[in-house]
Amino acid sequence: MDKYVILEAFGLDKVGIIAKLSEILATSNCNIEDSNISRLGQALTMMLLLRLPGGMNPSELLARLEPVKKELNLQIDIAELQPEAVVADLPRKPHCRLTCHGADKIGIVHKITKFLADNSINIIDMHTTVLRRAKPEYIMELTLELPGYIDIDKLRQQLDELGEELGIDIILRQ
């Protein structure tokens, strides 16, 4: 039976981090099945869903990664997943993109994500950044999974009202 893990790694961003980690994974016959790699400030963050080769356990993979972990001063952690959590066929739901833009202030993420959760809307991807200008601007982009019963026009109206309350622009795209 296949064994799956999530590998989390982060450290100060440098050219070649992804190449060095992926080389060890490839030579260890680990398949990268899904990934999310981003730079946050000056740190590179990685989350990789890996399928390990038969017979390999997570501690063996960590040992193989140790030299590059030390060389690049990375934090690396591995968590094992149950195969059914990875390969289960989930029903596809409609996706859309939500973009929020406006003056940076505390609480934007909370109010928007709470609104979405209260409306049974699942966030499957989220990126935020602050544009450091004379007046800092906040940008948040989300990919959402909508329940089948949602009324898009009503949702847009509610998001417009929330945007007015927060003093930001909120745009929903299908």
Image (spheres, helix red, strand yellow):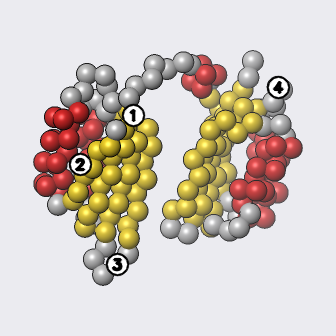
Which corner quadrant of the image does residue 61 belong to?
Answer: top right
Of circles 3 and 4, the one toward us is: 3
Lateral position of residue 36 relative to residue 32, left or right: left
The earlier-in-sequence mark between 1 and 2 is 1
Residue 156 visible in this rendered orientation of the protein: yes
Q: Which residue is mark 3?
A: 133
Q: Which residue is mark 1?
A: 95
Element type at marker 4?
loop
Instruction: Identify which amino acid the numbered label 4 is placed on.
Output: Gly
The image shows residue 41, relative to residue 57, as above or below, that is below
The earlier-in-sequence mark between 2 and 3 is 2
Instruction: Identify which amino acid the numbered label 2 is placed on.
Output: Lys
Residue 6 visible in this rendered orientation of the protein: no
Q: Which residue is mark 2?
A: 111
Real-space Cα separation, disc 3 to disc 4, in angstroms: 51 Å
Element type at marker 1?
strand
The earlier-in-sequence mark between 1 and 4 is 4
Residue 119 screen position, x and y as percent: 24, 32
